Amino acid sequence: MGFLDRLKEMGQQASTQAQEGWNRFNNAAFADATMAACALIAAADGKIDQTERSRTAQFITTSEKLKAFNVSDLRSKYEQFCDVISRDFDFGKIELIQKVSRVANKPEEARAVVQLAVVIANADGDFSSDEQRVMREIIYALKLQPTEFGLA
């Protein structure tokens, strides 16, 4: 199965899980992990473009996948995490990876974080090499393997 096919499959899995009820993941650690992953993806090239930041924030507030959550809280977390990584990229990245890793011992939640991060990364139709690199870091922080998600 090719990378793009795997990406589409992951998006379909995320949609299926959303329909089955993301509310089973409705907890602070999962919310922090997903929004930290989104901020990491947005900053994959070392900076956060305002257009990308706004587009991701808009996705968070309108996504069917996240409707089980208080989307205004998620958006606030996302904006906060974008500010953290924008102030100091290196230390901000460490802090956000730590937020992501808090669900590493919950495999179902960890996989859901990756699935949502992939949806965010692909929202603009371009899953860049920088985004793929950051996605691998997120996957490793969650004690998963990139090959499981089509990333070598």
Image (cartoon, rainbow, N blue to C red):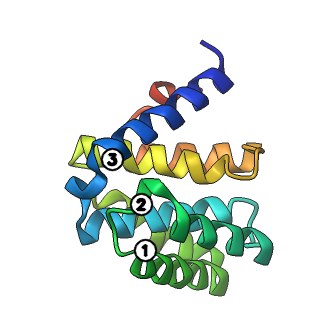
Mark yes or no: residue 130 visible.
yes
Mark 3 and mark 1: Cα distance apart in space: 20 Å
In this rendering, position of residue 115 left or right of residue 84: left
Task: Report the side of 98 relative to 127 (left or right).
Answer: left
- The residue beneath circle 2 is 66
Q: Is residue 13 above or below residue 125?
A: above
Q: Residues within 10 Å of mark 2 (few under 14, many from 20)?
A: many
User: Is label 3 or label 1 in front?
Assistant: 1
Specify the amino acid type for callout 2: Leu
Residue 71's tag is 1
Q: Residues within 10 Å of mark 3 (few under 14, many from 20)?
A: many
Quadrant position of residue 152: top right
Residue lying at 64% horizontally and 45% vertically, measured from the top left:
133
Q: CB of mark 1 within 8 Å of CB of mark 2? A: yes
**Marker disc for residue 139:** none
Q: Is residue 23 above or below residue 87?
A: above
Q: What residue do we see at 54% from left, 77% from top?
A: 91
